Amino acid sequence: MMLEKLRACWGFSSNVDRNVALVEGFLKGKRFADLAQEHDLSTPRVRQIIERADRLVGGGILTEAQPSKVSPRTDFMVDYPYVWNLAQMHGLSSATPRHFFRELEREGSLERLVEKMKRLPSRARTTRELVRLVWQKERGESPWPATKRSSIAIAHPSWVDHPVRALQCQLALEPALDQLVQRAAESGWTEDEIACALFELAGTRVKERLPSGA
């Protein structure tokens, strides 16, 4: 039914048979790269035809494709919407999935891509972040590490009312703050991002304590 609808939509195209064959092959589990080689096209062109077909029938092609015979970790083209949604959910660039698939095709498998990103941590930051999210999703892990209470004890104030209590409070919080910054940096946040986030959070907390209308 879906293929018949596509054939009707592409009825005036000279490549209707080829395009329908591409979609049919994709639905049977063939990868973009395999279809490109089979029909003497570039991989991006095959992807473009499949995505256009998906729009013409109102969706369903990209999500209903049968899994290929290769390991599911080595072919994520059928999961394009899933990867795209991950990028949107985590505020990554809209072009990131395309870069992700290009890198994945180049490496041949998700495992190799993960290893490559570990060796080249400074390359394609948004793509690397998407690789991490996809990898954790496939392994059933949460992309957010479990939050643990700080093991650093915060000193009690020495005086009830004293001019240096504010300074003493800063000194008491500093070790815990250093640990928080270090954990954030280990999770992939930059020093600038951490500093800006802490500044905004502190500012919001101060505003919440101000009287209404102040």
Image (cartoon, rainbow, N blue to C red):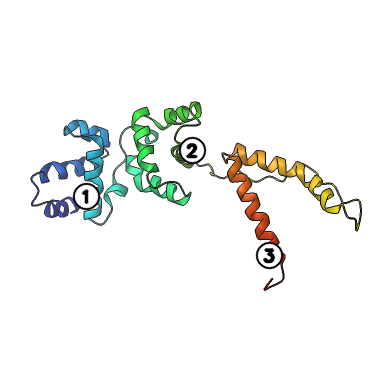
Tell me the kind of residue under disc 2. Answer: Arg
The label nearer to you, 3 versus 1, is 3
Q: Residue furthest top?
A: 119
Q: Disc 2 or 1, which lies upstream in sequence?
A: 1
Q: Disc 3 or 1, which lies upstream in sequence?
A: 1
Q: Residue at x 20, y 30 (%)?
A: 37
Image quarter (top left, top right, bottom left or bottom right) of the N terminus = bottom left
Image quarter (top left, top right, bottom left or bottom right) of the C terminus = bottom right
Q: What residue is shown with label 2?
A: 132
Q: CA distance from mark 3 to mark 1?
A: 52 Å
Kindly state the secondary structure of the residue where label 2 is placed. Answer: helix
Q: What residue is shown with label 3?
A: 208
Tell me the kind of residue under disc 3. Answer: Glu
Kindly state the secondary structure of the residue where label 3 is placed. Answer: helix
209 left or right of 102 in image: right
Q: CA distance from mark 3 to mark 2?
A: 36 Å
Q: What residue is shown with label 1?
A: 53
Label 2: how many residues lie within 10 Å, few (<14), some (14-19) or many (20+)? some
Label 1: how many residues lie within 10 Å, few (<14), some (14-19) or many (20+)? many
